[in-house]
Image: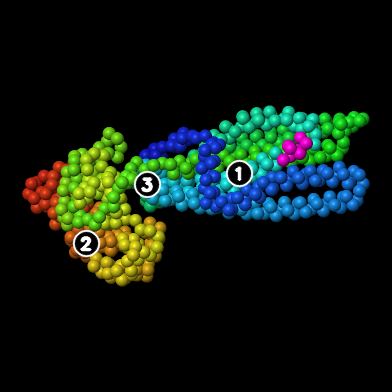
Amino acid sequence: MTSTPQAMGLTRLDPQQDREPNQRPLDLALIRRLWSYTGAYKRKRNWLLVMVFIRAAQLPLLAALFAAVIDGPIEGHRPSGLAIGVTAYVLLAAIEVAVYHFRLRLAMELGEAVVHDLRNEVFAHLQCMPMRFFAKTKLGRLISRITSDCNSVRMGVQEVLFVCAIQGGQMAVAAGLMLWRDMMLFGLLLLFAPAVWALNRYFHPRLSQAHRDVQESFSRVTSTLAESVGGIRVTQGFVRQDVNAQLFHDLVADHSQYHMAARRKHAVYLPLLDLNSQVFFAALLVVGGYRVLTPGGAASLGDLVYFIMLANAFFGPIVAIGKQYNNALEAMAGAERVFGLLDRQPAWSDPPNAAPLPPIKGRVEFQSIGFEYDPGRPVLEDINLATQPGQTVALVGHTGSGKSTMISLIARFYLPTTGRLLIDGHDTRTIQGPSLHKQMGIVLQSNFLFTGSVMDNIRIGRPDADDVQVIDAARRLGCLDLFEAMPDGFATQVGERGSGLSLGQRQLVCFARAMLADPRILILDEATSAVDTVTEARIQSALEQLISGRTSFVVAHRLSTIRHADTVLVLDQGRIIERGTHDQLLTAAGAYANLYHQFTRGIEG
């Protein structure tokens, strides 16, 4: 039987789906904001501006000098004057080449420096965003902000900004020299200005939208790629490679169509700009030639050559700027997206007057707490609980009952929608988050390890710990021999997301990390779900030592791990329906007893 996207619960690509909001393409406020990032490199930026201004004047001056040599020494048959003119031209050309080199070098260095700072700022901003943001934002979009969008910004700083400044300056200098030389022929040039204005007026909004579509479609490609790689085990396990490949093919085809549409528009825009300049040169030959050929004409052949050379210097930048407009739109789209992310404020953050949490004993209190991930859809309702320091609270219930949400509130990954959550009498809304997290240890079901050694991953629990302290934590956990049995012991390298270690080994690393942190509040969320029964038996006593003297919240499907909890909370649809000790709840023969008997029958079966 073959799987279809519909059978797998998937839908075909809708190009209008998941589109990001359109924004203005060439926004001066956005350009000024981007320009502000060059402020940290004023010396480099100012020297670059000097190079830009010099180069903008050099090219028209080279054209004027070339025409002057033809009009003067060559037409007047003066070899000495020709030698002087050629020497001056060669010297000016050599200076122009040197200026060009430093202009390119400084522009590349400045662009790289700006993107370096921008990427660091985006990454730091992401680290401060709450869990709700990551739950609702696709990973591919975040990746594209730091990769392709920042690359577009780099191109805008290195190329578009300064190239357009040079080309615009070149046009201004060339126009000034033409106006000074022959006002009538310059007036002919002005007749073609409306055509250039009309072309820009027509194509700019269309090109802007086309490039925005390209950027949006690329975000969808990166998002799907990240999702597919992250879920490769599920993909291969359910033999859905062909389905994923077809969906990705559709996304790439969609991106290609948008990209080609943008290029087609540009392929019409640039030739029309070039046609405008060619028509001007034809008109210049007619008008200028007539003025030269007419007896007693108002212009000489030298004037015509001079004007043609400067006209080249004037119209060349128009086409060059037209080509840069393509890059400018990509840079603006990238900057809009990057700054849009930076401007996105978290749903909540530490208030300005938030105080650091002093050393705590571990008293946790829920006061009439309610919570909603989405407005109007309560996940927790009227939760009341008071735990004393050192107590162990077990949370049980069916999937979706609210267990993980409760521990997320304790960890301050979210804030309550209603009610108050107190840590040693301090409202979690009024304290600094890091000061709480430094006194808290968390072991999750979906453990996460960073690339590096086993030693490095355990030391995350306490970065200032030395190797002896890390090894001692593993010894107290009762699993030192398991770590030493790894291929390189504590120096064993961990691949991306913990690859290279078994699920049980990854979980042991997380246990050791929590042991090393020595927290006042400990959260174990399905902490033994990935550990086999033999390993669980070995670390059970270590877990009891870890829990001893700490306020602990334990979520577990294996009810045998919570028999000795001081309080067991049974949750159902976001409410506490039973509470008491293990023995009390078994005697009550309620929901907990049913869960426990189901568990024991499952073991016997």
Q: Which mark is residue 160?
A: 1
Residue 190, percent across and down? 73, 30
The residue singled out by tag 2 in the image is: 546
The reply to whether residue 540 is visible in this rendering is no
Q: Earlier in the sequence, mark 2 or mark 1?
A: 1
Look at the image and give the residue range highlighted in magenta.
173-180
What number is the disc on residue 129?
Answer: 3
Instruction: Provide the secondary structure element on which disc 2 rests.
Output: helix
Residue at x 76% of width, y 32% of height: 186
Q: Position of residue 267 (x, y in %)?
A: 65, 37
Q: Which amino acid, mark 2?
A: Leu
Q: Quadrant of the N terminus?
A: top left
Say whether residue 273 is left or right of residue 351: right
* For discs 2 and 1, the disc positioned in front in the rendered view: 1
Left or right: residue 203 versus residue 221 is right
Query: Residue 107 location in percent, x, y?
Result: 60, 51
Q: Nearer the viewer, residue 484 or 356?
A: 356
The Cα atoms of the two marked residues, 1 and 3, are separated by 32 Å
Q: Residues within 10 Å of mark 1 (few under 14, many from 20)?
A: many
Task: Kindly identify the amino acid type of the residue bearing the numbered disc 3.
Answer: Met
Q: Which badge, 1 or 3, comes first in the chain's sequence?
A: 3
Q: Reply above or below: 110 against 505.
A: above
Which element carries disc 3, helix, strand or loop?
A: loop
Magenta stretch, main secondary structure class: helix
Which picture quadrant has residue 5? top left
